[in-house]
Amino acid sequence: MKNTAPRTGRRGLAAAVATALSATLLLATPGATSAAGEPDSPDLAALGWTTLTAESKVLAPGVELFRYQEAAPNAHRAHPRELSIVRMDPAKGALRLESTYGLKAGVSETVRTMLDKLPNDPIAGANGSYFANEGTPGVTPDTIQTFGIAARDGELTGANCTTDIANPRNGVVLQYGMPYFAPLEAVITVSSNVDEAKRPYGEETQRIDDVNRNPGGALGCSRDADDKAGKVGPYLDGHNKSISAFTDPTEFVLFNDTYKVPTPKRDVNKHIAADDQPGYEVRLDAAGKIIEGSAERGGRTVNRGEYILQAIGDHQADWLAQQHKAGATLTVTQKVLDHSFDEKGVTREIPLDESVDILSGGARLVEGGENIYAAKKGTVEYAWGSCARLYDVNGKDKEVATFAERAATDFCRDSRTVLGVDDQGRTLIATLTGPRGAYAPDGGFLPEIAVPLKSLGVMDAVNLDGGGSTTLLTDSDRTREGAPADWTRQNGLTDGPAPGTERDVNDALYIGDGGYPQ
């Protein structure tokens, strides 16, 4: 039914490869770091950051926490900002870097809840992919969708945004304990085995628009050219977050067994007319055979190893209905393409197997060791997530204009979460927020967090979901054999469902010890 490796034992081949890599690194590196004592925190004083020595520590062999406080804050900031960095060195411990959506990819949870549900206690974790809330709480089911490509164990949980060459959204591929950043494209199709003479409309193959989301309502970004023409909003969703919808009344959307909530019925989003259609829905067994279907879509749960396919639009729904009537077997094909080398005429496919997780990232902040925003000379493209909480020199709210230039005296209070890799192959997770001990929403422009990361030797870094989503947790006591994690939140809070609470998010990335579980 699909071209990915079967989900047998958890990452079997990946586990063997990663364990071998970890063993090689450990043998080649004398004196692995002890989990006791303080780390040798890099000095960022020249950049205006004071080391919080008492709060910096070695979390586990190969995993260090560095904490910094702003030395001379803007007079309009309520408190000095804080920079928190977790650095993972695979040469000093058997470590893994993976993602999790908790128990259900179709709904959001806090990072804390997701990490607590893992079979082995992680060392540290942070929020990951960009996402949007689909429904209206109390009116329709409050499901979520990614905007940008995401995957877990080689199974896609969301498709990519439409590629914009000037401002590409970057996917983060996590494989064998290392992150890889690239502009990614998901190509998903469904093909029928019905004889050519009997094919509806003479069409064997259809392009699937997205995975695990409400058909007709792509939120946050367009998924293809058809979506661009139907932009509506911005409007406030059920969490009072301003967002735009890119509507398309003719879509195929695939649901897999990561979704784990009932498939969406018509009219999930009250602001979008395109999703009001009944459409058509079929269930595919593990071999791809259609085993049930109906003209009123929604309300089905995807069983393990199966797919559910929804269609809206007269043509699309009729094609699917006729496949059901014919007892067709459908083949779903999923590919992820890496466009990093397009200028050289090379498009690389990333094989989707159980070793691969993908996070939906945003802007590239550091590339080839350079802060790529330095050349912008103060210009910030707000439409690409650079600042939603903008203030002028007097501390007054300032309207965020699309592709507007900011004044040199403007400042930003958007919290940031960033993932990077340094010149020694170490992975860094960084947050820029207000103080962790107070509710004081704060952060900075994208270039601001790129500056200290570049000083730390970071060669490549990508911005992840931020604002109220920013979360960085570390296990404060790793000596408790078999006991649950004792999480310490290292970031300040911006705005969850209520001021001072952690926000439910799409997924989380985490650092774990002991190599890859079998």
Image (cartoon, rainbow, N blue to C red):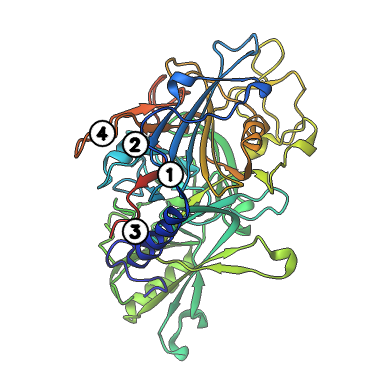
For marks 2 and 3 on the same chain, the one whose residue lies earlier in the sequence: 2
For marks 4 and 3 on the same chain, the one whose residue lies earlier in the sequence: 3
Q: Which residue carries the number 1 mark?
A: 31
For marks 3 and 1 on the same chain, the one whose residue lies earlier in the sequence: 1
Marker disc for residue 139: 2
Q: Are marks 2 and 3 in contact (CB under 8 Å)?
A: no
Residue under the image location 53 percent in, 29 percent down: 41
Q: Residues within 10 Å of mark 3 (few under 14, many from 20)?
A: many
Q: Is residue 292 above or below residue 144?
A: below
Q: Are marks 2 and 1 in contact (CB under 8 Å)?
A: no
User: What SS does tag 2 mark?
Assistant: loop
User: What SS does tag 4 mark?
Assistant: loop
Residue 34 seen in this snapshot: yes
Amino acid type shown at disc 2: Val
- The quadrant holding residue 2 is bottom left
The Cα atoms of the two marked residues, 3 and 1, are separated by: 60 Å
The Cα atoms of the two marked residues, 4 and 2, are separated by: 46 Å
Residue 386 seen in this snapshot: no
Amino acid type shown at disc 1: Gly
Residue under the image location 72 percent in, 33 percent down: 380
Q: Which residue carries the number 4 mark?
A: 479
Marker disc for residue 297: 3
